[in-house]
Image: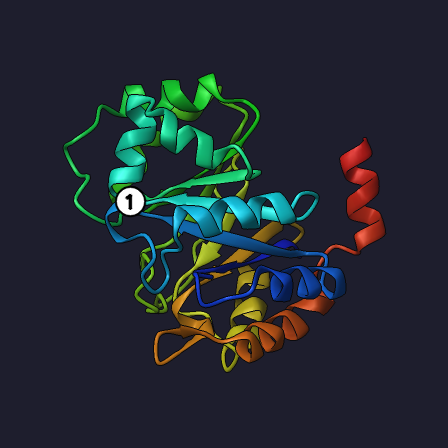
Amino acid sequence: MQLKYTSITGADDAVDPADLLALSREFPFAEWAILLLPARTGTPRFPSKEWITRFSQLAKGLHTAMHLCDGALLGFIRGDSEILDLMSGFKRIQLNLKFGDVEGKYDPADLVQRVRDNPQFQFIIQYGRDKQSLLPLLADVPNHAVLYDDSAGRGISPDSWDPPLPNHFCGYAGGLNPSNVAQQIAIIAQVAPGYTTWIDMETGVRTDDKFDLAKVRRVLEISQPFAIPADAAAKAKQG
């Protein structure tokens, strides 16, 4: 098992983007995932639109993702230009189907069509057993990935990890933090032998709900032996 990304979610206005860029130079497999929720921009975990724009300009060439939450997810499905503009500076887009009040407010077919309409992004589907009905709709959509994430940002570890879904690029999130990530990576490796995957964490790299760069660094140090080497990743991208 190899990690393509260690995704760190939740940097906000209290974080200097330059600190994230410096960590990426040291740990090229780091992915910075930024939460977008229009109703809470400028609050902990949810940076302002100005911060997002500055970060995406500085982070060109790095691994980046935007997580669309609640109103941002619904806005994407509607095709809101403001949401699409903020997305444009990122490489992967996570659709947080298990966060906020979105259940029953969109047509899954419309969501899948929006994914098809934007092949420049890889879309991450926040997945749980209650979302299995989406998978058949994505069967012929190449620009998607699946994140096992029953925690949905609450910092709760699952009792066990599921093996990757056939024909889907799958990642893992839920309760990961510096104290357990080595053990959890080893467990994921047992259910995903020979697979390339990624892990994601949010609450586990915060202290008193503040983004903690020391915790982030520790997680990246622990993940590094499992990461795809930078030269191999570059060759794969060129191929």
* Quadrant showing the N terminus: bottom right
Tally of numbered discs: 1
Residue 182 or residue 46, whichever sits in front: 46
The residue at the point 23 percent across, 48 percent down is: 39
Nearest to the observer: residue 204 or residue 79: 79
In this view, 237 is above or below 182: above
In the image, residue 137 above or below residue 87:
above
Classify residue 7 by image quadrant. Answer: bottom right
Q: Position of residue 230 (x, y in %)?
A: 80, 53
Q: Farthest residue toward the front?
A: 50
In the rendered view, does 49 fall on the left or right side of 168?
Answer: left
Which residue is identified by label 1? Answer: 38
Left/right placement of residue 176 relative to residue 227 reads left
Q: Residue at x 49, y 19 (%)?
A: 140
**Whether residue 18 is visible:** yes
Callout 1: SS: helix
x then y, percent, for residue 48: 39, 52
